[in-house]
């Protein structure tokens, strides 16, 4: 029985492919050099889909893919989450979701303007703190929002902190740790139980 796996293109894909290869999943060509988005494994048991991170949970919850690999940040942000199980921490893509602001900024404000791509995560975080916020949704380069006066602070992914420092910002609170996760469609977990469990067992041994 063949399994379809939706993979987050970019950084996660690069780190994930060697792990899949160690489980015998190889497509026999250089995925990153190809413009193709669907690949069959040489063994014939897997089909790999290369999609945007935020589309991985969508493919999996609708059953268009049996499994998916994407970051915990994407899963937290995805609305829904009822159509899949999160089964494995792949141990790659480790980073943190953090708040950050210009060095020395005064954030003691009645209402904070928060620029972020992680609208849900930011809303939940500030609701827990009972801090009124107005969320400014951006799709990237959040670091420049406070510099340009669009926001007081940001919620963003931080790995080394170099991007923040390069833009005159400092990391403040850690909201949550992030890493790459394997998710499984709920129906596939039943109908393709043996194949799914075999893959998870193999992956668990190599992560
Ligand atoms: P850094 O400068 O090392 O703190 O990296 C910060 C930038 O790299 C962020 O703006 C993110 O967009 C990106 N980044 C770092 N780690 C990850 C990750 N594990 N997953 C996705 N994006 C990441």
Image: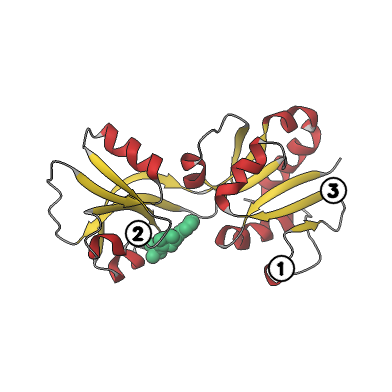
Marks 3, 2: nearer the viewer: 2
Residue at 38 percent across and 54 percent down: it is 138
Q: Which mark is residue 35?
A: 1
Residue at 47 percent across and 40 percent down: it is 76
Q: Earlier in the sequence, mark 2 or mark 1?
A: 1
Q: Which mark is residue 142?
A: 2
Q: Earlier in the sequence, mark 3 or mark 2?
A: 3
Q: Of residues 83 and 41, which is closer to you in this image?
A: 83
> Residues under labels 2 and 1: Cα distance?
29 Å
Residue 81 appears in the figure: yes
Query: Which residue is tagged 3?
Result: 45
Crowd band around label 2 with a 10 angstrom C-alpha radius: few (<14), some (14–19), many (20+): many
Contact (CB < 8 A) between labels 3 and 2? Answer: no
Q: Is residue 3 above or below residue 156?
A: above
The quarter of the picture where residue 21 lies is: bottom right
> Which quarter holds ligand 1?
bottom left
Colour basis: secondary structure
Position of residue 178 in the picture relative to residue 86 (left or right) = left
Q: What secondary structure is found at the residue carrying circle 2?
A: loop
Position of residue 155 in the picture relative to residue 191 (left or right) = left
Position of residue 168 in the picture relative to residue 117 (left or right) = left
Residue 29 image point, x, y percent: 78, 68
> Residues under labels 3 and 2: Cα distance?
41 Å
Q: Quarter holding the N terminus? A: top right
Position of residue 183 in the picture relative to residue 49 (left or right) = left
Crowd band around label 3 with a 10 angstrom C-alpha radius: few (<14), some (14–19), many (20+): few
Crowd band around label 1 with a 10 angstrom C-alpha radius: few (<14), some (14–19), many (20+): few
The quarter of the picture where residue 162 lies is: bottom left
> Residues under labels 1 and 3: Cα distance?
22 Å
């Amino acid at each position: 029985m063949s399994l379809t796996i939706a993979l987050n293109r970019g950084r996660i894909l690069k780190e994930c492919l060697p792990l899949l290869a160690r489980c015998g999943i190889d497509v026999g060509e250089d995925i990153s050099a190809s413009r193709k988005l669907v690949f069959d494994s040489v063994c014939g048991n897997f089909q790999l889909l290369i999609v945007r991170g935020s589309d991985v949970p969508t493919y999996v919850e609708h059953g268009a893919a049996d499994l998916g690999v994407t970051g915990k940040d994407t899963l937290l942000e995805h609305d829904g989450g009822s159509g899949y199980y999160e089964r494995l921490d792949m141990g790659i893509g480790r980073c943190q979701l953090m708040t950050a602001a210009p060095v020395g900024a005064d954030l003691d404000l009645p209402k904070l303007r928060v620029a972020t791509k992680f609208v849900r995560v930011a809303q939940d975080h500030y609701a827990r703190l009972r801090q009124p916020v107005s969320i400014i949704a951006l799709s990237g380069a959040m670091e420049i929002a406070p510099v340009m006066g669009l926001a007081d602070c940001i919620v963003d992914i931080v790995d080394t902190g170099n991007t923040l420092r390069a833009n005159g910002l400092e990391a403040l609170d850690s909201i949550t740790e992030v890493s790459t996760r394997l998710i499984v469609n709920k129906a596939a977990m039943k109908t393709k139980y043996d194949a799914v469990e075999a893959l998870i067992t193999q992956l668990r041994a190599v992560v």
